[in-house]
Structure formats: C-alpha cells, structure tokens
C-alpha cells in the first residue's frame, strides 16, 4: 500500500485544487525529471502521462536517468507553464519511480499499461495506439508530495 500524499503547507492561497492539477497535467506534455546520480542531481526534460494517481515517464532505458532511477528511485518532477509573472503556474511531484512492463518495452500485452499508453499516444503523437521502438520503457512515479502554484490567483487576489 502506498503512503498518502503529503498535503501542501505553504502557498495554499495560490495552490491549485486537485481538479486543477489533474486538468493542468492532462494538458501539458513536457516535464523536467530530476534524479540522483553518482555525480549528484541530474535534470532532463521528458514527455509524461498522468492518470490522476501516478505520473508515467516513458524513458530511454540506456539513459543516465534510467541508470539513476535503478540505483535510487527517488525523483522530483516539475511541470510548469507561463511567461509573465502573473501567468506562472505549475506542479512539482516528489516521489519514487518503479519500472512497469518489460524493459525495453516491445508491446507485450500488459493490462496495467493500456490506459496510460493510449493517453500518451493521443497526447504526444496524435495516434490511437502506442508504438514501441524497443528503446523505451515505463517508469511509474508514486507521488509522496505534490506542490502546486498558480500565480494567476495572485492577480485575482489583488483585483478582488
């Protein structure tokens, strides 16, 4: 059983609601994944999926990111958007990553991956089905903490 996600304690006035987090993560494609490697932190951009509970990363299995997660599953992931100050909004997820499915993924039947692969293929490739190149595999991030911010709410607070 997974531990409950720790509640956000700071910045609650500008925090997104759970529904806003779900909508935001469904709309965005790119996240920044930070892992811990032998030389310290390693951060890289990556496409992702979100199912309302887990963050899904489709990662090249011969990457530094993959090697880092195999040695230390702790990760931090940031998804953000906006250019101007009062438009900045985003989500940070801290948690642990684990492999789901075969490594590398070749398309072997896996009921646990059906939904996320369909979502990922539609969102990132405009396809109805996921294709597999034999170079990537799935990492499922179980959040231990989710923090969010939406500076657009500051503008609303200032106006109100």
Image (spheres, rainbow, N blue to C red):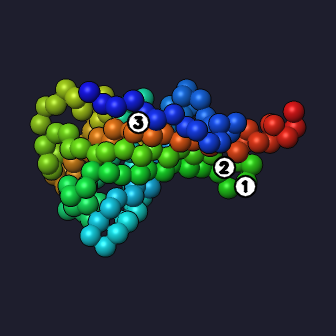
Residue visible at 21% across and 48% down?
A: 137
Residue 19, position in %: x, y? 55, 26
Residue 27, position in %: x, y? 52, 38
Quarter where residue 158 is shown = top right
Tag 1, which secondary structure? loop
Question: In the figure, is residue 63 to the left or right of 25?
Answer: left
> The C terminus is located in which quarter?
top right
Quarter where residue 105 is shown = top left
Q: Is residue 44 visible?
A: yes
Residue sticking out furthest to the front: 9
Residue 31, position in %: x, y? 45, 51
Tag 3, which secondary structure? strand
> The N terminus is located in which quarter?
top left
Q: Earlier in the sequence, mark 1 or mark 3?
A: 3
Residue visible at 45% across and 44% down?
A: 93
Residue sticking out furthest to the bottom: 39
Q: How many numbered marks does the figure carry?
A: 3
Residue corresponding to mark 2: 88
Residue visible at 33% across and 38% down?
A: 142
Tag 2, which secondary structure? loop
Q: Which mark is residue 84?
A: 1
Are the residues at dot 2 and dot 1 in contact (C-beta closer than 8 Å)? yes
CA distance for labels 2 and 1: 7 Å
Residue 54, position in %: x, y? 36, 35
Quarter where residue 96 is shown = top left
Q: Earlier in the sequence, mark 2 or mark 3?
A: 3
In front here: 101 or 119? 101
Residue visible at 29% across and 36% down?
A: 117
Question: In the figure, is residue 7 to the left or right of 142?
Answer: right
CA distance for labels 1 and 3: 26 Å
Residue corresponding to mark 3: 50
């Amino acid at each position: 059983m997974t531990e409950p996600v720790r509640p956000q304690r700071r910045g609650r006035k500008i925090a997104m609601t759970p529904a806003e987090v779900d909508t935001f993560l469904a709309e965005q494609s790119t996240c920044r994944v930070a892992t811990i490697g032998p030389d310290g932190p390693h951060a890289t951009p990556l496409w992702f999926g979100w199912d309302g509970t887990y963050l899904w990363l489709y990662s090249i299995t011969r990457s530094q990111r993959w090697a880092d997660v195999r040695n230390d599953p702790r990760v931090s992931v940031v998804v953000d958007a906006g250019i101007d100050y009062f438009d900045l909004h985003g989500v940070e997820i801290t948690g642990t990553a684990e492999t789901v499915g075969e490594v590398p993924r070749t398309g072997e039947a896996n009921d646990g991956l059906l939904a996320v692969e369909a979502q990922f293929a539609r969102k990132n490739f405009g396809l109805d089905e996921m294709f597999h190149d034999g170079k990537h595999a799935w990492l499922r991030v179980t959040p231990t903490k989710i923090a969010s911010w939406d500076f657009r709410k500051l503008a609303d607070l200032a106006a109100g």
